[in-house]
Image (tube, grey):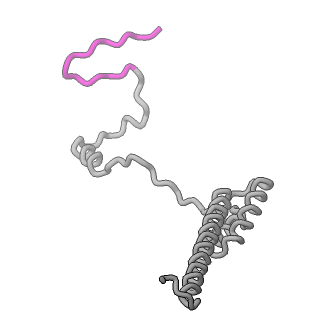
Amino acid sequence: MTTPIPPQQPGTQPTTPYPQAPHAAAPQADANAVRYQQQAAPQTAYRPQPAVATTLGATNTYAVLAVIFGFLVPIAGIVFGHMGLSQIKRTGDAGRGLALTGMIVGYAYFAFIAIFLVVYIGFIAMMFAAMGTAFSGSDLYY
């Protein structure tokens, strides 16, 4: 049977009905020292995380090459991006985002170059057409 806990008087310290642990018999520190220790050691809201190694060794090589060649040689970026995606799908390597980035940059760069060449050739053709009418010897204005 358990013993009932007697009611406490106001202003007194509560007592526990359980026996004290052996370490509780040690002398108590000064109350001012405890307050100072609590103020001196601020509590942090987070714990610093240990450094994590990069996963470049586990990244698909074709995916890395796709990003590099996507900016330099767009056709190579497209080819290596497709090869990297198929290899990632087959083996489960990391680097799917890199392969997609290389492909997208390669396609966009290739489209930009193609449009630029069409417009450039069109301007050259218009220039030759204008020069042809200027030097044809016929007078358009009567």
Residue 63 image offset from top left, x and y in percent: 69, 64
Considering every residue shown, the one lying at the far right of the view is: 90
Relative to residue 32, is residue 79 drawn left or right?
right
Relative to residue 34, is residue 95 drawn left or right?
right
Which residue corresponds to the image point at 41% horizontal and 22% vertical from the top-left? 18
Relative to residue 8, is residue 89 drawn left or right?
right
Q: Quadrant of residue 105?
A: bottom right
Q: Quadrant of residue 3?
A: top left
Our reading of the magenta stretch's main secondary structure is loop
Does the stretch in magenta take in 15? yes
Q: Say above or below: 74 vs 47.
A: below
How many callouts does the rendering have?
0
Residue 85 image offset from top left, x and y in percent: 73, 58
Residue nearer the viewer, 22 or 62? 62
Residue 106 image offset from top left, x and y in percent: 65, 67
Q: Say above or below: 104 vs 40.
A: below
Considering every residue shown, the one lying at the far left of the view is: 11
Which residue corresponds to the image point at 52% horizontal and 57% vertical from the top-left? 50
Q: Quadrant of residue 111?
A: bottom right
Q: Say above or below: 136 vs 6.
A: below
Which residue corresponds to the image point at 61% horizontal and 64% vertical from the top-left? 108
Considering every residue shown, the one lying at the far front of the view is: 142
Residue 69 image offset from top left, x and y in percent: 66, 72
Q: Which residues are magenta?
A: 1-17
Residue nearer the viewer, 58 or 119? 119
Residue nearer the viewer, 34 or 40? 40
Which residue corresponds to the image point at 52% horizontal and 87% vertical from the top-left? 139
